[in-house]
Image: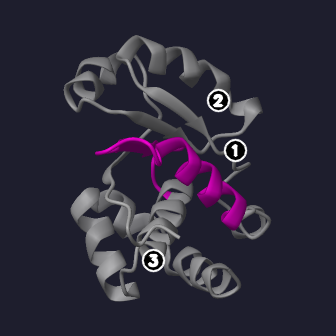
Amino acid sequence: MFEDQKIDLFLGPRPGKKSLKRLQDLNLTHCCTLLSKREGAPLIGKFCKKIGCEWVWLPIEGGKLELLSQVDLAGQMQTLLQKIKDEPNPQVYFHCSAGIHRTGFFVYSLLRLMGHTPKKAQSKLAQLRQVTANQVGQERLELAEKMIAQL
């Protein structure tokens, strides 16, 4: 699905006033929000306009396994691919609330779909953001593997 797509990935917590300058300096093309509507996700769309990037909203209700197991991973990946496909060098910031559980689950899944082995995907996740790699939880990575196997 993403094997031929080059994407520069950035991970972190929910963007806000304190991170405005740092995110502007990354020259992002897209900001991928993994929050639900009740968590104020639509406000991130306004933030993205301020920093000059396109907003991609892939709602995930929470980071608990029961909630993640209900995610339409194929559909969300397809939505992301459609949003970035015409960008020659996509620079994408992924976040949920803290940038750990949902972000780790989703980005790990993306790395696997980009052709990385499980070990390489975990290593890349650590390179991108150590706290995410440390705290995403093995159970979320195992769930991602099960879901990817069904795609």
The residue labelled by disc 1 is 59
Q: Position of residue 127 (x, y in %)?
A: 22, 64
In the image, residue 145 above or below residue 34:
below
Q: Quadrant of the C terminus?
A: bottom right
> What kind of residue is marked 1?
Pro
Q: Position of residue 50 (x, y in %)?
A: 41, 11
Whether residue 82 appears in magenta in the rendering, the answer is yes
> What kind of residue is marked 2?
Ala
Task: Answer left or right for 87 relative to 68.
Answer: left
Quadrant hosting residue 116:
bottom left
> What kind of residue is marked 3?
Arg
Task: Answer left or right for 90 relative to 46.
Answer: left
Is disc 1 placed on a helix, strand or loop?
A: loop
The residue labelled by disc 2 is 41
Residue 98 seen: no
Magenta-highlighted residues: 73-100
